[in-house]
């Protein structure tokens, strides 16, 4: 099998599962266009652990890890199978790269995984397993974590970092009737960096990009982008999937990193 690309997908608010907006149809089209993987590996900020964990379940449950949203969200199931053999291979690859890691037999799929997968693979016919985001990562170590996952791309695994290109929950909850300029300026800066394949600039986003602190008061929703880019490798140019900005402040952009 040829080497697969890696993806960063913005999963936004859980309501993205009910409100596809611009991003939903474009992720559907992307899923149809991509080479079909043996399995999808998702790194999401909604599973953070001390050291890394790999979900080993053969039939991972759909986790509704949120509160206060419309009832139909809690009725959604994403019944994709797991892939225990490739999960075990991931465990071995991470150990070989020097990461502290262990398997998690009963872990399901959090909404950072199943919400975007509803669009990428709506028939739930591609096996899925999650790898946790280790606590305490910075930009460099998140990139290195992605590099450790890179060998799996040659074995039919689609590595997906799921986060949000902007993620200020305080402003999201406050509500905005228009797109905030800070969000569009931050997004434009990141788009330019990934389109140029400027890996160092991508790693320095949270230090150098305009309005970075406001776009990401905490870093966990940005780090999956660095995991995906690290798994793609230095200098890899990304295709931007324009997802627009929802609720005035949440960018729904996704990136396809293809060597």
Image (cartoon, helix red, strand yellow):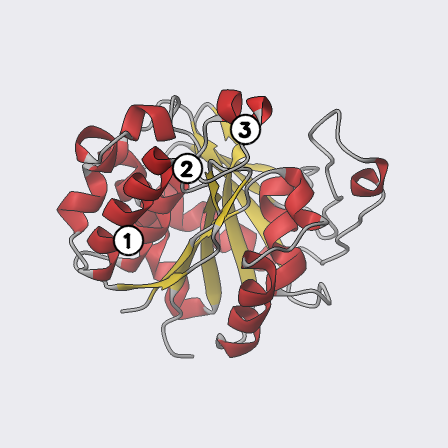
Task: Residue 177 in the image: state x and y as whole percent.
Answer: 55, 35
* Secondary element type, mark 1: helix
Q: Residue at x 41, y 37 (%)?
A: 166
Of tags 1 and 3, which is closer to the observer? Answer: 3
Vertical arrangement, residue 238 with respect to residue 94, above or below:
below
Vertical arrangement, residue 50 with respect to residue 96, above or below:
above
- Circles 1 and 3: CB atoms closer than 8 Å: no
| Mark 2 surroundings: few (<14), some (14-19) or many (≥20) residues within 10 A | many
Q: Which mark is residue 49?
A: none
CA gap between label 1 and label 3 equals 22 Å
Task: Residue 72 in the image: state x and y as whole percent.
Answer: 84, 42
Q: Which mark is residue 191?
A: 1
Task: Name the residue that disc number 2 marks.
Answer: 166
N-terminal-most mark, 1 or 2: 2
Task: Residue 171 in the image: state x and y as whole percent.
Answer: 50, 24
Quadrant assignment, res 154? bottom left
CA gap between label 3 and label 2 equals 10 Å
Q: Residue at x 21, y 40 (%)?
A: 203
- The C terminus - image quarter: bottom left
* Secondary element type, mark 2: loop
Task: Name the residue that disc number 3 marks.
Answer: 172
- The N terminus - image quarter: bottom left
Quadrant assignment, res 201? top left
In the visual, does 116 lie left or right of 207?
Answer: right
């Amino acid at each position: 099998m040829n080497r697969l690309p890696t993806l960063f997908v913005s999963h936004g608010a859980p309501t993205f599962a009910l409100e596809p907006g611009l991003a939903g149809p474009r992720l559907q089209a992307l899923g149809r266009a991509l080479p079909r993987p043996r399995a999808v590996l998702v790194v999401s900020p909604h599973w953070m652990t001390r050291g890394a964990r790999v979900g080993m379940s053969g039939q991972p449950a759909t986790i509704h890890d949120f509160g206060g949203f419309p009832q139909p969200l809690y009725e959604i199931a994403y019944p994709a199978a797991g892939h225990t053999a490739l999960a075990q291979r991931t465990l071995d690859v991470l150990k070989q790269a020097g990461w502290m890691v262990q398997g998690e037999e009963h872990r399901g799929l959090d909404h950072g995984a199943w919400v975007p997968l509803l669009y990428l693979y709506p028939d739930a016919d591609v096996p899925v397993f999650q790898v946790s985001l280790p606590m305490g990562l910075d930009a460099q170590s998140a990139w290195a974590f992605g590099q450790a996952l890179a060998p799996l791309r040659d074995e039919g695994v689609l590595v997906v970092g799921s986060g949000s290109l902007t993620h200020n929950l305080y402003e999201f909850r406050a509500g905005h009737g228009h797109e905030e300029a800070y969000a569009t300026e931050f997004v434009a800066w990141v788009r330019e960096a990934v389109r140029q394949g400027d890996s160092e600039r991508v790693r320095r986003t949270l230090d150098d990009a305009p309005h970075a602190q406001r776009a990401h008061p905490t870093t966990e929703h940005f780090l999956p982008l660095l995991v995906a880019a690290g798994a793609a490798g230095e200098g890899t140019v990304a295709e931007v999937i324009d997802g627009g900005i929802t609720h005035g402040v949440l960018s729904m952009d996704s990136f396809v990193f293809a060597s």
